[in-house]
Every structure is written in C-alpha cells, then in structure tokens.
Image (cartoon, grey):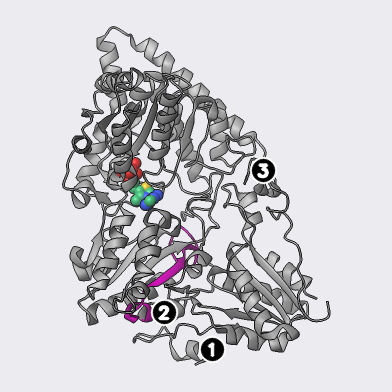
C-alpha cells in the first residue's frame, strides 16, 4: 500500500518510540522467549523511550536492567540466542559499540557462518544513533556503515513510526542477528524535539516490512535522492524547496542497508539520470560510496551526475557552528542537487 | 581543599542557571547557551578535592563524564574550561570537546564520556612514569556504575601486576543513571574488588572530607613511593538527577531527601570551625571562589564561537594532504561529463 493510502486507512498517529515499543510488546506477548536487556531500560523506560511502559507489563525478568558491561550483556544475548531464545539487547548510544565490539562482530555476526549454518543467532541489537544536539564526538555518531560493512548482520534504519513498527516485528522474528538503529531525533522524546515527519499513522495490528525493500517517499522525475533515517525528512524538506525552483526530486528511503534494495534505486536513476546520496555517517568507505558504486555497476550509462552528502571525515564536534557545518541539512542537500545540474 | 570544594559547588550552581536558559519552559536539550548533556556533581566535591590536594601539576588525572569538580581540584584553567563548556573558540579544545571531554595538558588532565574507558589511559600514564623513572603518579576517577566494566577490571590487574603508580578512585553515589547498585552487583563495596587483584582497597565516607583527604594521602603516597596501586572508594550522595533534565521518576523520594541532607561542604565547614578557623576566614574563601567563578563565566560568555570551518582542523596533528575534505569535491560520474 502506498504511504498516502495507508495514512487514510489508519486514523491513529504514534511517535516512533511508541511504534517500536508496540511491536516489542506484541512479540513478547506472543513468544515467551523474547526478552529485552540494556542499561536503564526497566525503571527508566530507556533513555530514548525505547522501552517506555514495558516494565509494567513484563516485569524485571523480561525487561532487564543490566550492569554497565556491554561485552557481557551483548555477548549474553548471543549465547541466549544460540540456545534458541530471542533476546533484544540495547546499546544506549551506538557510540558504545566499541566496548562490546568483539561480541558483536566476532560472535554475533560470525557464528552462523563459522558453524557452517549449524548455529543461528536470532537476536536484535538496538542502538540510538545520530547527532544534531551538540553532545560531541562520543555520543553523536551514526555508524550505519560500520555494521553494514561487516558481514553477518542485517542492518535496519526506520525513518517513521510506520517503518519503526513493521521493521521491529521483522527484526524480532528473523532468525539472523539484526542491528536496529533508531535516530534519537526521530523518537519523539520530550527533551529532543522531532521534526514533523516521523509521527505517522500506525495500524493497531502487527505487520511486517520486508527487509530489502526501499520506499519511495516522494516521486519525482528530475533527480533521485537516496537516504535513510533522519535524513529522509531533511531530504523531503529539500525536495519541497526544490519543487519551488522547478526541480522535481524523487526521495528514496532505503529502510534497510543489509539487505540493500539496489533495484529501486537503479530504477529511479534510470528515470532521472541524476543521483544524490545523503547519509549522516562519515563520508569515506560508507553508505554513500556503496550506493553510488552499485548504481555505477548497473546503470553507468544512465548516470549523468552524482553527488554525495555525508559527514566529512571528522569526528562530530561539540560546538554548534561546527556541528552544523559537518552534519548535512536541507541546504546541503539542495546544494548537492543543484550541483548535479 | 575547602576552597576547591566551594568553588566547584558554586561553579556548578552557576552552570546550572546558564544551562537552563533557553531550555524553558519545554526542556529542549539542544537549545540555550550551553548545548548537549550536562552532568553535575553537587555533593561529590570532597572526593575530588581530597584526592587532588595530594597531586602536582605533572601528575595525571583522568575523569569520567561528571568531571567539573575533579577538573577544578586538579587546577584546570577555569576560564578556558568554561569557554569550552559554552562551546567557544578559546575553550580548552576550541569548542570541539565540550563538558564531558575536557583536556588540559598543562595540568595533565583528560576526560572520557565512555564509561570506564578513561581508566586504561591512567594506567598508561603510570607506566610512562615508571619507565622514565619519574615520581609522578596517575589517578583514574570513575563512578560505582563503572566498576562492572571490563576496562576497569583489566586495568586493576595490569596496574597490580606491574606495580604501577596509580590510584583508582571510585565515587560511589549509589546510582548509575536509574540503576541502583543492588540491581547490578552483588558486591556492596567496590573497594572489595581490590582483593581479587591482591592490591589494597579502602572505603571512606565522603561526609568526612578530612577522612577522604587522609585516605587519599595514603593511596597517593603509596603510588609516589613506588609501592604500587590502590583502589580507593568514596561513598558520596547524588543530590541531583543524572543529567540536567533527568526527571528521576525511578528514584524514591526518601532517597533524594536523604542525599540532600548529607553535605560534605557543610560538615567540613563545621569541622574547620571546630579547629578554630573562624567563620570570617571561611566567608572570605567563599566569596573569593564566587568571584573567580563569576569572572570565568562572564569571560567565557564574551568569547567568540568557533568558525564552522574549524571543524576540519585537528583530526591529525600532522595532516596528510588530501585526507580531510574541507570542501568535498564535486565528483561527476558517468554520462558524457
Ligand atoms: C560504555 C558506556 N556505556 C553506557 C554509557 C551511558 N552512561 C553514561 S553515565 C552512565 C552511568 C554511570 O554511572 P556511574 O559510573 O555510577 O557514574 P555517575 O553517573 O553516577 O557519576 C551510563 C550508563 C556510557 N557513557 N558509556
């Protein structure tokens, strides 16, 4: 169903965090083996409201506060998953991945392969990503590319409440490890105001969004803007502005990085001929380079111009003017589109 | 020591006022003159002051995400630290670090916002001192929530097995954000963990600032005289939320009230008066501290913000040409271009 039809069919809007929580609660009711662990996820309800309200229904045994020991609890999720349970482990900020990285990329991501497929790791690793609130280099990274680069993890990135719920249902039901990266700015938390876009109509019943299906958030014929997460909304804003200038931009929300829906992107580029890829992760060796090279592989002849918009290769600075400089905004996206003309 | 403690308290009270500006009525973390998160340490001043009294400028201190009281006690430049917290160009890090990432090489002070990850570098500083045959020491500060982290336990072992001149100082304020100690550890006293590494562990109560001072004297003395590392735990009380804006819905009111009633600054002031230091002398110390703080804050607020392009500097000390894209080049691919 297209976004518009969907919006008309459902009259209830949720924030992205409510939508995520709804999917988790549903899966926990259906399956005793699903549980959630992380720091401040029980009584606090998650620093980014990612577990708000779950403690009341499920108690401390299934919504588990854990010590500040990322290696231990991410690894424990791997172990429980290998025994057939379906843990969800939350890294409060994705930047903390380094502390538990061995468990993530040498255990969680590789055990299926190294066991010749005899072992599966049906767990979800959730983490908050993103800057735009001046919290400096250790609390503002996006790191989409890091997880997508290392084989063995499916990587999903919701941009709205509708996606957040559907992708979470899939993530929990999937027999492989899924990294579910939610942008703080989209969650709808009181102290970190969200833009208008992420609060969307969300059906009451459960539904899934297949991994590897990008969504065309705005149709257009002049230029293709490919992006994900918060930057879907920034790209849509830029597209509105461009429309005033007579440029009709198509905006594609990737929704998952692994698997990546190259087909939808290529189809769009065949139509528009111009490609702009926007990402809040670092520029080099990342999402923008990957998308461009896939399009080049399949549709080089259709490609008239390419631009990449991403964080230049610097850690995220604290102070406002510098953070604004490095994190792409609507103006940067517009300028990139104009540069393809 | 009293001086450092009242400076830190007043400093954070002023920061709190400044921080809330522009964030009211609806709290928005990214608004106002001080952006980002802010973690205040009201009630924990004695732990920092009592330890840092025994340190010289060439001794190394690493602090966690709640660093101001420690930085002040270590003698970090107050003006430039404040400018950093306001995100200004003349700040310690030119506005790149912010409140959780204060670096002042003049007094060998550094911070990390990643829990317990500032601890291994302190061990490294101790290692450097030992290798060079110098008598400087290193101190790693951390919270009681951080003692469950591998980096801390591995560091205790490395320092112990190498007899390094390091003191590990745990500030136990009972809470790690919303997690009370008893939900995340069966070991009530972090100092007990020293046993597992065969090094001395000592626990003191923060209400008695002089006891903190004495215990730190012993720990730093051991390190200074090459007798190896010590784990010192100071029981403190968290008087505020974890960060500014924390609604503390998880915290029982009695606990908040109990914490508010324990104030090592008040008890130290009583102690000093019992030792015949008159109220007037203490008053002078307090007003001098306030003047210094007010001056630092006024100065910081007048400082310019960095230029946006400054963001591209300092990735490397020795930047290889072509690596940092200050102006991402416009690559055109394919077609007829
Ligand atoms: C590796 C890592 N995990 C989680 C966090 C998030 N976090 C920041 S402060 C904190 C609690 C720390 O508690 P404690 O060490 O007791 O220090 P306190 O805040 O009480 O001073 C947590 C979990 C982090 N910064 N780094």
Q: Nearer the viewer, mark 3 or mark 1?
A: 3
Residue A216, image x and y in percent? 58, 84
Indicate left or right for B39 with B88 as reference: left
Query: What range is drawn magenta here?
Result: A170-194
- Residues at marks 1 and 2, CA–CA distance in whole angstroms: 19 Å
Residue at the image position 68 percent from the left and 68 percent from the top: A308
Comparing marks 3 and 2, which lies closer to the viewer? 2
Pointer 1 and pointer 2: residues touching (CB < 8 Å)?
A: no
Mark 1 or mark 2: whose residue is earlier in sequence: 1
Q: Give the structural element (helix, strand or loop) at label 2.
A: helix
As rendered, which of A78 and B16 lies closer to the eye?
A78
Q: Nearer the viewer, residue A112 or B74?
A: A112
Say the numbered circle drawn on residue B306.
Answer: 3
Task: Write down the quadrant of residue B84 in the picture.
Answer: top right
Considering every residue shown, the one lying at the far right of the view is: B336
Q: Which disc number belongs to residue A124?
A: none
Residue A236 in sight from this viewpoint: no
Give x and y (percent) for residue B80.
57, 31
* Disc 1: host chain: A
- Left or right of B101 on screen, residue A177: left
Residue B120: where, in percent of width, then height?
39, 39
Which residue matches tag 2?
A167
Q: Secondary structure at mark 3?
A: loop
Residue A105: image quadrant is bottom left
Residue behind mark 1: A4
Q: Chain of mark 2?
A: A
Indicate yes or no: mark 1 CB to ligand 1 under 8 Å.
no
Whether residue B223 is visible here, answered yes or no, is yes
């Amino acid at each position: 169903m297209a976004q518009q039809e969907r919006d008309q069919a459902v009259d209830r809007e949720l924030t992205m965090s409510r939508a995520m929580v709804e999917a988790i609660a549903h899966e926990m009711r259906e399956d005793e083996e699903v549980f959630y662990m992380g720091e401040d996820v029980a009584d606090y309800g998650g620093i980014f409201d990612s577990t708000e309200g779950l403690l009341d229904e499920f108690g401390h045994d299934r919504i588990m506060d854990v010590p500040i020991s990322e290696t231990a609890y991410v690894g424990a999720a791997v172990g429980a998953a290998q025994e057939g349970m379906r843990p969800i482990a939350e890294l409060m900020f994705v930047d903390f991945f380094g502390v538990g990285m061995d468990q993530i990329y040498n255990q969680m991501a590789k055990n299926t392969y190294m066991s010749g497929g005899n072992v599966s790791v049906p767990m979800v690793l959730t983490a908050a990503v993103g800057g735009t609130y001046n919290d400096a280099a250790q609390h503002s990274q996006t790191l989409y590319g890091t997880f997508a680069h290392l084989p063995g993890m499916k990587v999903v990135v919701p941009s709205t409440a509708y996606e957040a719920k559907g992708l979470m249902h899939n993530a929990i039901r999937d027999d492989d490890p899924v990294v579910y990266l939610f942008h703080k700015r989209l969650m709808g938390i009181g102290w970190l105001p969200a833009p208008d876009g992420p609060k969307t109509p969300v059906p009451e019943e459960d539904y899934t969004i297949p991994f590897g299906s990008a969504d065309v958030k705005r149709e257009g014929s002049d230029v293709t803007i490919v992006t994900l997460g918060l930057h879907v909304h920034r790209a849509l804003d830029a597209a509105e502005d461009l429309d005033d200038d007579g440029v009709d931009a198509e905006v594609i929300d990737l929704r998952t990085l692994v698997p990546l829906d190259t087909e939808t992107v290529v189809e769009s580029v065949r139509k528009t001929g111009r490609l702009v890829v926007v990402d809040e992760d670092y520029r080099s060796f990342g999402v923008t380079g990957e998308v461009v090279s896939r399009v080049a592989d399949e549709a080089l002849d259709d490609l008239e111009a390419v631009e990449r918009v991403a964080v230049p290769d610097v850690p995220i600075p604290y102070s406002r003017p510098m953070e604004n400089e490095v994190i792409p905004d609507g103006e940067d996206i517009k300028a990139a589109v104009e540069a393809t003309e | 020591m009293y001086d450092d403690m009242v400076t830190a308290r007043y400093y954070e009270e002023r920061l709190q006022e400044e921080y809330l500006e522009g964030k009211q009525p609806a709290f928005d973390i990214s608004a106002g003159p001080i952006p980002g998160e802010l973690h205040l340490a009201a009630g924990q001043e004695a732990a920092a002051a009592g330890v840092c009294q025994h340190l010289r400028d060439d001794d190394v201190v690493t602090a966690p995400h709640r660093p101001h009281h420690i930085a002040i006690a270590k003698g970090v430049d107050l003006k430039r630290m404040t400018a950093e917290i306001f995100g200004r160009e003349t700040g310690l890090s030119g506005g790149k670090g912010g409140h959780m990432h204060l670096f002042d090489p003049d007094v060998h002070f550094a911070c990390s916002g990643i829990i317990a990850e500032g601890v291994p570098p302190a061990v490294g500083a101790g290692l450097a001192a030992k290798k060079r045959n110098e008598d400087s020491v290193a101190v790693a500060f951390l919270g009681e929530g951080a003692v469950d982290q591998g980096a801390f336990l591995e560091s205790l072992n490395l320092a112990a097995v190498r007899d390094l001149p390091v003191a590990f100082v745990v500030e136990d304020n009972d809470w790690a954000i919303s997690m009370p100690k008893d939900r995340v550890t069966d070991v009530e006293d972090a100092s007990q963990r020293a046993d597992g590494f065969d090094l001395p562990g000592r626990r003191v109560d923060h209400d008695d600032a002089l006891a903190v001072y004495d215990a730190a004297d012993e720990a730093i003395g051991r390190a200074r005289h090459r007798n190896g590392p010590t784990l010192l735990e100071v029981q403190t009380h968290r008087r505020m939320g974890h960060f500014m804006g924390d609604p503390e819905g998880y915290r029982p009111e009695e606990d908040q009230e109990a914490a508010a009633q324990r104030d090592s600054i008040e008890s130290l002031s009583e102690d000093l008066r019992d030792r015949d230091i008159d109220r007037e002398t203490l008053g002078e110390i307090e007003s001098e501290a306030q003047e210094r703080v007010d001056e630092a804050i006024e100065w910081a607020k007048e400082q310019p913000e960095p230029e946006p392009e400054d963001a591209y500097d300092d990735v490397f000390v020795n930047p290889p040409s072509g690596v940092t894209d200050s102006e991402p080049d416009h690559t055109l691919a394919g077609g007829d271009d």
